[in-house]
Every structure is written in structure tokens, then in C-alpha cells.
């Protein structure tokens, strides 16, 4: 098993780099989605409770949605960091392997290409252009993956508590036919969920569900299904901490990060250490930290574990971060970490800070140009995204109790 670990960590790193966009206040209406470690949302189109099935895929969360008429079920990465929703379509000369049939627009009665006069075209100029009667999109992600195809309009549907599905007509999405780089075969594309008008949340409006909430269960939990909740369906919770979103041109859920503590000690960092704040993103499996700050985090952790004479495993199997140790039997002195946001402290317990694999454990974070709080570091915490007040609230919670 030790020989398999570098490959597994490489896969986890690739998943961690899947941050594709750079790798709500009404109490009158509420709804929830089922999560089997997957996700979804909604608003004006969902006056009733909907319960889409959401499933874990590796270290990411995905959401099922029906596309077209008749409907074809597809799993998407639940991605708070992306705007455009896309799925692989036929014909597809350069598609990654997926465990599901490609979406065939010719078999759908409601499919059409995005017209030139559509109001959302003004929000697509950064990644699409109009040529020969079609808007072609081309999105390149920070870790080297890319997706391109035709901007289109189609009916999306999600399971409902009623007998029939809830239908969202005329959703703008990408019919993708040329993908490059690593994508998991357990998904067919990305469900864009950031604050852009082009995202699924943006297209569904915000008048009836200006808040959404989720609680991701840990990897070792027997409960694999939780709910993504909206509006009045969000359970009231005490002791929630909150911090405001920063104004960003990329519509990300970015907040101000002012410092980091490791093992209860605040790191001595320059005030300019986080010029771009910290982005909250479920589409990124593992977190990233600005490179210079990561070096200090690594130094402090090495110093911490040296006190207990743990054997550090030779680095080098992963080029962008590989801090791994072999624990002794009964070892319990794992440190925690705190992200100090403006007005709130986000605690990361050891179970979310390290990957525990066979006879070793590794820091589940990697150095990068930006700081991202990924899905692995969000396990067993309740998040409430308050779009009306432009802030995020959170607290620790046993997410297994939020099962569908």
C-alpha cells in the first residue's frame, strides 16, 4: 500500500486543483436538496421543497440534474467557484472519459443555441464570442484544465418532494465538446454556483431564497447524504460566526483573511500576506495557501512534530506540497489550525487538516498563488451563505445529523 500512496496523493492534488473559475434572506419560501456528498440550489423556480440527490465522488461533492426533454440525468461537480454550468455533449472529439452517456442535444425537444440578443450574453464576454451563428465558449482553469463548446439553452430538472420533478426552463449552459486536462470520470461537467448572473443561482433569481446552507459529512461518516437547504428551510442555529464577502470581479465567495494560527500560536506574518483574501470553494477538494505563507505553516508544523520525534517521509512525490509523517502507535498530538477572517475565527481540526492514509498522514493543503478553503477543510461545519447581507456564517456541527 505504501507504493500506492504517491499516486493517490497525486490524484488528490489534481482534485484539489479543480478550482475551475481561475483550480439569501427570505423566510417565506424554503427548500432543501439531498446530498450524498453532492449539491444544488434554487429560488423563484422552487416554491416547494425539492430534494435532488447529491453524491460523493472521490474528495469532491457532486449534484445530479436532469437535462433536456426528455430528461437525461447527469452528475456535476458542485462548484461554488465557477459561473458557467457545462456538460459534455455529443459530438465530442476531445472529451474526458465519463461513466455516463454524453448529452445529445439532437434528442431534446427543448435544446437551442443561445441567441445573440439574450440578456445574459453581456456576462459571457470574458469567456465566449459570437461566430457563425453561435456563441462559442472557452474556459481555461488555473491548474491547466480547459473546456470549450457552444453556449446553449436547455431545460434543467431536479427531483421534488412531489411526484413530479421541478423544472427550470431556459437555463443558459455550456454544451462542451473539447476538454483538456484531468477530470474525474464520475462527473460529466461542472455546476457553476458562484455569485455571477450566469451561475445557476444567478439564473434562478434571489427573491424567494436569498440564503442557502450546507453541511458536508466527513469521509469516514456512514452518512453519505445531507441536504443543501434554502430560505426558510434552513434550520435556525445559534453561535454562528460571520464574515462579509469581498467585492470581486470574478463573483467568488471571497472573504478577508487577516492571519493564521497553528497549534494555538498566531503566525508572525506581514499584513500583506493575503492580498486576495480567501475563497470558499466546494469545487476545490483540498485547500491552498499563498506560497510564502505555506512555507511558514510548513516550518511551524515541522517544528511541532520534531518535538515528538516523528519520522518525516521524504518529500518529492508531489511537486507542490508533500509534508507527510509516519505516526507512532497511539500518537495523538496533532495540531489544529485557525483561519482568522475579519470578525470570525474558522477552526480546522486535525481530522480536516491532515489526510490519514494507511501508515502515514499528510498535510491536506498545498502552496499556490491564492488561498482557497476547499471541501475537505469544510467537513462537519454548517455554512450559511446570506446573499442579501453579502456574508457567510458558519459553525461546527455534526453533519451526520443533517441526513436526508
Image (spheres, helix red, strand yellow):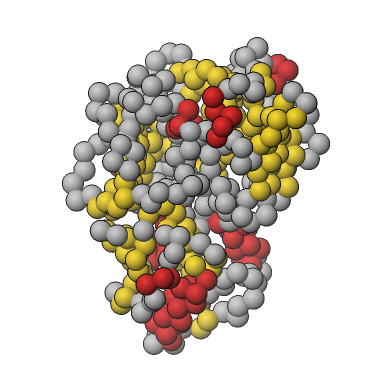
Residue placed at 63% from the left, 62% from the top?
10
Residue placed at 69% from the left, 34% from the top?
129
* Quadrant in which residue 27 is drawn: top left
Q: Quadrant for the C terminus, please.
A: top left
Q: Residue lying farthest right?
A: 93
> In this orientation, does residue 112 appear?
yes
Q: Residue lying farthest left?
A: 238
Q: Nearer the viewer, residue 264 or 44?
A: 44
Q: Nearer the viewer, residue 9 or 136?
A: 136
Residue placed at 57% from the left, 51% from the top?
22
Answer left or right for 274 relative to 191: left
> In this orientation, does residue 62 appear?
no
Residue placed at 45% from the left, 49% from the top?
248
Name above or below for residue 388 compared with residue 204. Answer: below
Q: Position of residue 352 (x, y in %)?
A: 41, 61
* Quadrant in which residue 329 is drawn: bottom left
Q: Quadrant for the N terminus, please.
A: bottom right
Answer left or right for 384 relative to 175: left
Q: Position of residue 203 (x, y in %)?
A: 48, 28
Answer left or right for 29 relative to 169: left
Name above or below for residue 37 compared with residue 218. Answer: above
Looking at the rendered structure, the number of numbered marks drawn on it comes to: 0
Q: Position of residue 36 (x, y in %)?
A: 46, 38
Q: Position of residue 340 (x, y in %)?
A: 32, 64
Answer left or right for 194 relative to 172: left
Amino acid at each position: 500500500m505504501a507504493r500506492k500512496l504517491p499516486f493517490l496523493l497525486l490524484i488528490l492534488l489534481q482534485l484539489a486543483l479543480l478550482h475551475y473559475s481561475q483550480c439569501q434572506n427570505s423566510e417565506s419560501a424554503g427548500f432543501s436538496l439531498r446530498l450524498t456528498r453532492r449539491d444544488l440550489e434554487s429560488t423563484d423556480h422552487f416554491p416547494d421543497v425539492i430534494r435532488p440527490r447529491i453524491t460523493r465522488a472521490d474528495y469532491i461533492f457532486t449534484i445530479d440534474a436532469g437535462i433536456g426533454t426528455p430528461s437525461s440525468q447527469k452528475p456535476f461537480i458542485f462548484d461554488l467557484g465557477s459561473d458557467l454550468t457545462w456538460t459534455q455533449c455529443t459530438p465530442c472529439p476531445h472529451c474526458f472519459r465519463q461513466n455516463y452517456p454524453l448529452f445529445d442535444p439532437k434528442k431534446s425537444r427543448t435544446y437551442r443555441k443561445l441567441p445573440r440578443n439574450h440578456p445574459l450574453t453581456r456576462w459571457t464576454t470574458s469567456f465566449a464570442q459570437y461566430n457563425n451563428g453561435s456563441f462559442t465558449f472557452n474556459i481555461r482553469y488555473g491548474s491547466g484544465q480547459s473546456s470549450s463548446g457552444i453556449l446553449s439553452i436547455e431545460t434543467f430538472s431536479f427531483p421534488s418532494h412531489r411526484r413530479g420533478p421541478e423544472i427550470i426552463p431556459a437555463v443558459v449552459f455550456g454544451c462542451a465538446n473539447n476538454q483538456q486536462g484531468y477530470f474525474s470520470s464520475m462527473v460529466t461537467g461542472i455546476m457553476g454556483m458562484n455569485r455571477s448572473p450566469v451561475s445557476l443561482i444567478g439564473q434562478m433569481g434571489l427573491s424567494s431564497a436569498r440564503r442557502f446552507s450546507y453541511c458536508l459529512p466527513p469521509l469516514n461518516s456512514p452518512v453519505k447524504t445531507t441536504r443543501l437547504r434554502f430560505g426558510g428551510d434552513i434550520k435556525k442555529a445559534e453561535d454562528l460566526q460571520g464574515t462579509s464577502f469581498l467585492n470581486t470581479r470574478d463573483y467568488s465567495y471571497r472573504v478577508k483573511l487577516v492571519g493564521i494560527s497553528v497549534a494555538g500560536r498566531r503566525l508572525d506574518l506581514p499584513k500583506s500576506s493575503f492580498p486576495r483574501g480567501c475563497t470558499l470553494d466546494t469545487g476545490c477538494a483540498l485547500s491552498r495557501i499563498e506560497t510564502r505563507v505555506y512555507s511558514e505553516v510548513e516550518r511551524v508544523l515541522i517544528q511541532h512534530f520534531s518535538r515528538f520525534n516523528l519520522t518525516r517521509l521524504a518529500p518529492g512525490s508531489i511537486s507542490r506540497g508533500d509534508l507527510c509523517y509516519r505516526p507512532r502507535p497511539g500518537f495523538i498530538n496533532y495540531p489544529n489550525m485557525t483561519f482568522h477572517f475579519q470578525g470570525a475565527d474558522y477552526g480546522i481540526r486535525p481530522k480536516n487538516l491532515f489526510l490519514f492514509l494507511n501508515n502515514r498522514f499528510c498535510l491536506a493543503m498545498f502552496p499556490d498563488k491564492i488561498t482557497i478553503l476547499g471541501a475537505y477543510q469544510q467537513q462537519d461545519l454548517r455554512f450559511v451563505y446570506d446573499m442579501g447581507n453579502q456574508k457567510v456564517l458558519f459553525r461546527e456541527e455534526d453533519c451526520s445529523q443533517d441526513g436526508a
